[in-house]
């Protein structure tokens, strides 16, 4: 059979059309959320080669981590990759009815956006404190004036013993009565952990193999840290550079352990990575929106696990006696601390001024000692933290307030303990980020 030139051309065009169509369909099959998730994990690991603090935890495939260590990509190449992954992610369609998959897509979008900002910072771009906080943590930190903090200081002045000296000196003298002796630190801390664990397990089901070990360390910019290892295991480190006050026992036990960082990471690994195969959960980039949820829920979790009434009872009957402290002072101590807690955002103002170049080190110290009520040694430690972690400071106070508002709104008025715990546990076992708390 003979073919005319026209017929041959038609056959060729038809072949090209179907071949192109099949190729396009093949590409569409390749671009899935799981593919994007793998690309995201590898990207975060590669960015971590430029900043050792960036990857806070990783428990994914070891070969990915090994490959990242063996190949250090240029920052420009990492920016291009981030943009390309973000572009592919945008093309993925998710049903509006599939709420969890929509949360997953938003999670990846926000985390990628923060990763891009981090690469720019590593490349030399300098953001203001507020812009950095928005780009990295998906949140806008509030601003407070000296007048605001002075009003709180007046309340605190009336609550402190009327000894001579400045309000800061009187506060330090008062608080120094409540230092845990070093030889009793592990006993007190272990008891606080056991209490927080017992309460948490009444409301949250955890894997039987979950566990953590506690280490006491020195020469750190932070007071406590959870290093999540994967497989439901954490290493919790407590910094003993400075005296540790009795309130820090429950605070650290809850924040770093139950129902804080340890439980948060265990639930994400169990519910999202193990059960659903979401590999992106296996890597935790510290400078990302995830940190506001992590720190905010860990701080709010202190009140979830031991609300005021239960905490005072536990402190009075158990912890104060274990530490050898005067249990009759429990109520007075915590009433003073509640006022000091209102000064939490003073640290943000110090960080904003310091990082934006508006405060000298001396002015930053003044803010921390005058309004955050730090002694000089803690103020020095805090400045080291600010220099190292920058706008990360917002995740503790702003994060706590946003999580608190979200949980209380979802739980409704006068919720039962079970309802409050349910809303809280649903939050920390989901990929929800700061923008989703509104």
Image (tube, rainbow, N blue to C red):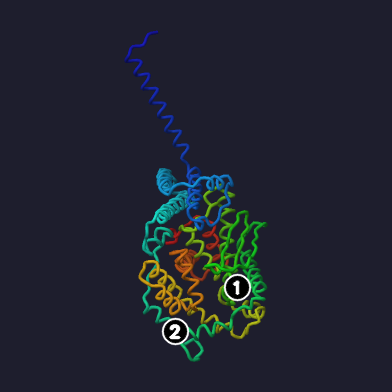
> Toward which corner of the image does residue 259 lie, by quadrant?
bottom right
- Camera-side residue of 125 and 140: 125
**Residue placed farthest to the left in the image?**
6
Instruction: Tell me what residue is drawn at x 44 percent, y 37 percent.
Output: 28
Residue 315, by quadrant, is: bottom right
Question: In terms of depth relative to the viewer, which is nearer, 300 or 420?
Answer: 300
Residue 116 image offset from top left, x and y in percent = 41, 52
Residue 292, relative to residue 249: is it above or below?
Answer: above
Residue 176 rendering spot, x and y as whole percentages? 56, 82
CA distance separating discs 1 and 2: 26 Å
Q: Circle 1 sits on which residue?
A: 249
Percent coordinates x, y for residue 72 in the rendering: 49, 47
Count of marks overlaid on the render = 2
Is residue 73 placed above or below 162 in the rendered structure? above
Quick check: can you spot residue 188?
A: yes
Quadrant, the C terminus: bottom left
Of labels 1 and 2, the one closer to you: 1
Q: Position of residue 129 (x, y in %)?
A: 38, 64
Q: As rendered, which of 294 and 432 lies closer to the eye?
A: 294
Q: Residues within 10 Å of mark 2 (few under 14, many from 20)?
A: few
Tell me if 33 is positioned left or right of 147 in this view.
right
Q: Which residue lies under the disc numbered 2?
A: 155
Residue at 36%, 68% (x, y): give it: 357
Query: Is 280 placed above or below 19 here?
Result: below
Residue in view at x 40 percent, y 8 percent = 1
The image quadrant that residue 246 belongs to is bottom right
């Amino acid at each position: 059979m003979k073919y005319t030139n026209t017929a041959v051309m038609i056959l060729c065009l038809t072949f090209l059309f179907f071949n192109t169509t099949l190729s396009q369909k093949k590409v569409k099959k390749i671009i899935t959320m799981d593919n994007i998730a793998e690309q995201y994990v590898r990207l975060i690991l590669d960015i971590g080669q430029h900043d050792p603090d960036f990857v806070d935890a990783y428990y994914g495939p070891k070969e990915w981590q090994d490959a990242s260590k063996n190949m250090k990509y240029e920052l420009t190449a990492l920016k291009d990759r981030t943009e390309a992954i973000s572009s592919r992610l945008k093309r993925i369609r998710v049903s509006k009815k599939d709420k969890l998959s929509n949360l997953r897509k938003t999670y990846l979008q926000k985390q990628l956006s923060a990763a891009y900002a981090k690469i720019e910072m590593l490349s030399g771009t300098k953001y203001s404190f507020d812009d950095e906080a928005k780009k990295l943590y998906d949140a806008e930190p509030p601003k407070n004036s000296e007048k605001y903090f002075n009003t709180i200081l007046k309340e605190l002045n009336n609550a402190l013993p009327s000894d001579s000296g400045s309000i800061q000196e009187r506060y330090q003298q008062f608080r120094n009565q409540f230092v845990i002796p070093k030889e009793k630190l592990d006993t007190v801390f272990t008891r606080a952990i056991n209490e927080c664990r017992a309460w948490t397990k009444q409301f949250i089901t955890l894997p039987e193999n979950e566990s953590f070990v506690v280490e006491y360390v020195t020469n750190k910019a932070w007071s406590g840290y959870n290093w999540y290892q994967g497989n439901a295991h954490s290493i919790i480190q407590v910094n003993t550079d400075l005296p540790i006050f009795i309130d820090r026992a429950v605070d650290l036990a809850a924040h770093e352990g139950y129902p804080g960082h340890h439980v948060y990471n265990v639930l994400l690994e169990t519910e999202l990575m193990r059960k659903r195969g979401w590999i992106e959960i296996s890597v935790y980039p510290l400078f990302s929106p995830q940190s506001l949820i992590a720190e905010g829920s860990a701080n709010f979790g202190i009140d979830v696990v031991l609300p005021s009434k239960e905490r005072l009872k536990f402190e009075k009957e158990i912890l104060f006696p274990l530490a050898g402290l005067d249990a009759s002072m429990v109520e007075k101590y915590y009433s003073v601390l509640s006022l000091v807690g209102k000064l939490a955002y003073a640290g943000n103002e110090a960080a904003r001024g310091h990082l934006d170049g508006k405060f000298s080190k001396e002015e930053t110290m003044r803010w921390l000692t005058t309004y955050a009520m730090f002694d000089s040694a803690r103020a020095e430690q805090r400045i080291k933290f600010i220099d190292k972690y920058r706008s990360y400071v917002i995740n503790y106070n702003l994060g706590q307030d946003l999580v608190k508002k979200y949980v209380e709104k979802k739980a409704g008025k006068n919720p039962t303990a079970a309802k409050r715990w349910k809303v809280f546990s649903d939050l920390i076992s989901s990929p929800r980020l700061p923008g989703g708390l509104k």
